[in-house]
Image (cartoon, rainbow, N blue to C red):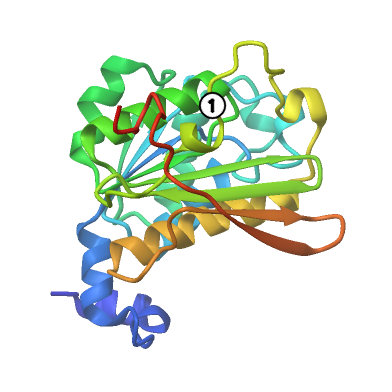
Amino acid sequence: MLSPQEQLRFSRQTMLKSIGEDGQQALKNAKVIIVGLGGLGNPASLYLNAAGIGTLYLVDGDTIDVSNLPRQVLFNDAQVSQGKADIAAEILNQQNSETNIEVLDEMLDEELADYYFPLVDVVLDCTDNITTRYLINQKCLEHKKPLVIGAATGFDGQYMFVEPNIADSACYQCLFPINKNAPENNCQTLGILGPVLAIVGGLQALQAMKFLTGNKVATNQLSIFDGFNNSWQQLSIKKQQHCPACGND
């Protein structure tokens, strides 16, 4: 049951027929892990925390750099060189002290994924490291955990939803097979504008909230945002039978 204070706080959400008090209670009961507290993890964590998610696990072993500040809106000059996950948790706790926040001040590895992924309802990949992306994808498949992937560089962003509990749901590796010779394209090599990250990170939070409240979330679809022309494109993707991560071989 929602308390009278919660009913008031989340009234604009519960008045939505697709959410209601049952949906808000589902958010309150939910556990979400966010891997990466950079440009995507900042807005995603802000919106999930504000929406009343019961437990957030924040995973990031990186520290705040002055070059992060134009796009990582949780942080300020006084926090440079401090841990991203720790500072994010402090700010989020001020925003909504009812959320249980657990900080993992280290980079995700197999051991951490194997311990924490079984505890949560959905995983958000907010990283900018291709090796970590493949690891998150693989561990979500192994532990049957829904995954919301986001990425952005320059004026462009994209996101997709992977649901391992649906037999024909394509995974990240179906779309992007491992290529050891592929360039490491990220914000450090290609640049980025902050609002693009806000859009993609916000949509990652939205997909997670829709899933947690029992609303439909599209699978087998890559949504691509062109921020320069303010346009969207949805690409249909298929589960690959020979995918090393999720295929049937």
Q: Please give the name of the residue rendered at 27% of the width and 42% of the height, measured from the top-left corner.
A: 145
Q: Amino acid at mark 1?
A: Pro
140 shown above or below 184: below
**Label 1 packing within 10 angstroms: few (<14), some (14-19), many (20+):** few
Q: Position of residue 178 (x, y in %)?
A: 54, 20
Q: Is 136 drawn above or below residue 156 in the view shown?
A: above
Looking at the rendering, which quadrant does residue 30 occupy? bottom left
Residue drawn at 35 percent across, 27 percent down: 138
**Foreground of the two, 26 or 160:** 160
- The structure residue drawn at horizontal position 27% and vertical position 49%, both measured from the top left corner, is 167
x%, y% of residue 196? 72, 51
**Position in image of residue 182 (x %, y %):** 68, 17
Identify the residue at image location x=81%, y=63%: 230
- Tell which of 96 and 28 is nearer to you: 28
Q: Is residue 126 above or below residue 226?
A: above
Q: Quadrant of the N terminus?
A: bottom left
Per the image, the residue denoted by label 1 is 177
